[in-house]
Image: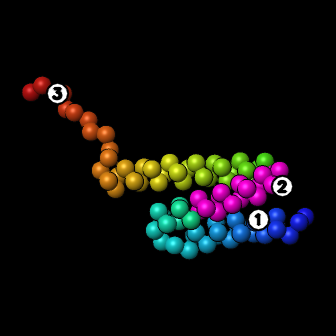
Amino acid sequence: MIWWVELIGYLGMATILTSFAFRKMTVVRCINLVGCTISIIYGAIIVAYPIIALNSGIFIIHCIMLFIDYRKKNNLEPQVEDKSTD
């Protein structure tokens, strides 16, 4: 395999591994998104569908969780009106 292709794979792996060294979940998720993106590119280059599928799934989960955390942090939860009659 060409050396730069392997380098991309190692870079993605190192980024994902490094993301777990942080305490804040938001930071972990953001750095992990970068690692997943690199790993998806690596998987596409070597045509490894399991690598692409796994990292795409993790990427989507992190995006959803970051969106949920953002909404909670900024009080953007949908407001439910109480329509009960007393």
| Disc number lying in front (2 or 3) | 2
- Considering only order in the chain, which callout, 1 or 3, is on the residue closer to the N terminus? 1
Between the residue at mark 3 and the residue at mark 1, the CA separation in whole angstroms equals 58 Å
Residue at the disc numbered 1? 9
User: Is 58 or 46 nearer to us in this picture?
Assistant: 46
Give the percent coordinates (x, y) of residue 83.
18, 27
Secondary structure category for the residue under label 3 = loop
Vertical placement of 71 versus 79: above or below? below
Q: Residue 12: which quarter of the image?
A: bottom right
The amino acid sitting under disc 3 is Ser
The amino acid sitting under disc 1 is Gly
Vertical placement of 3 versus 82: above or below? below
| Disc number lying in front (3 or 1) | 1
Residue at the disc numbered 3? 84
User: Is 62 or 85 nearer to us in this picture?
Assistant: 62
Query: Which residue is pictured at 58% across the width and 69% down the height?
Result: 19
